[in-house]
Amino acid sequence: MNKSLVAYFSATGTTEGAANALAKAARADLYRITPAQPYSSRDLNWNNSSSRSSVEMGNDSARPALAQVAPDLSPYDVVFVGFPIWWYVEPRIVDTFLESCDLSGKAVVPFATSGSSGITRAASRMRDIVPQARVLDGRMMNDRPSTSELEAWIRGLGL
């Protein structure tokens, strides 16, 4: 496989665990997508229509600021992008990251965690955001797959 990066956003630590496991299996570098303003538990209250996450997810053009400049992705051929599913898609901070990077000609492989939603809508939306990249269908990581399962999945991607 080509040189890979696992970039992820994790609001509560769940996606971080999946990202660490994937980076180990892919022998990839790891990068945490960090918002300039961290999300508090109040911000994440999806039952409150005035919470920060609800307001951001209600606005397709919302782009929360990153805490640091996005990394140079020129050394990488494959970028795994991980996130929790919010409102059936990736959080807007992930969109900020995608738009901040040059993903031209790269394979982008989404992976996600969620209590109940799938990844299909997120992958489709990501294709619209980074049309210069080849965005694959990706994988849900709720089941905490083993290293060997992840290695088999990665091989099956044909990267």
Image (cartoon, rainbow, N blue to C red):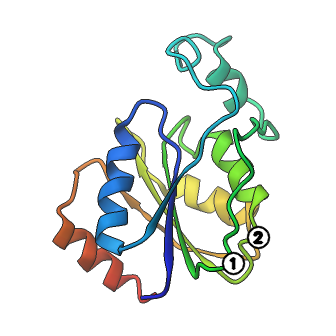
Residue most toward the right? 61
Residue 95: horizontal and vertical position, in percent?
Answer: 70, 49
Figure quadrant of residue 133: bottom right
Asked if residue 146 is positioned above or below residue 56 in the image, the reply reads below
| Label ID, residue 102 | 2
Disc 2 crowd rating (10 Å Cα; few below 14, some 14-19, many 20+) is some
Q: Position of residue 59 (x, y in %)?
A: 77, 32
**Residue type for callout 2:** Asp
User: Quarter-wise, where is residue 93 in the image?
Assistant: top right
Q: Is residue 92 left or right of residue 22?
A: right
Whether residues under marks 1 and 2 lie with C-beta atoms below 8 angstroms apart, the answer is: yes
Q: Earlier in the sequence, mark 1 or mark 2?
A: 1
User: Three-letter amino acid code at disc 1?
Assistant: Ser
Q: Which mark is residue 36?
A: none
Query: x and y percent of residue 85 in the render?
Result: 49, 41
- In what element is the residue under mark 2? loop
Q: Which mark is residue 74?
A: 1
- Residue at x 35%, y 38% (from the top left corner): 14
- Image point 17% across, 72% down: which residue? 148
Residue at x 43%, y 51% (from the top left corner): 112
The answer to whether 146 appears left or right of 129 in the picture is: left
Q: Secondary structure at mark 1?
A: loop
Which of the pair 104/49 is nearer the observer? 104
Residue 156 higher or lower than 18, as above or below: below
Q: Quadrant of the N terminus?
A: bottom left
Nearest the viewer among 132 and 70 is 70
Q: Nearer the viewer, mark 1 or mark 2?
A: 1
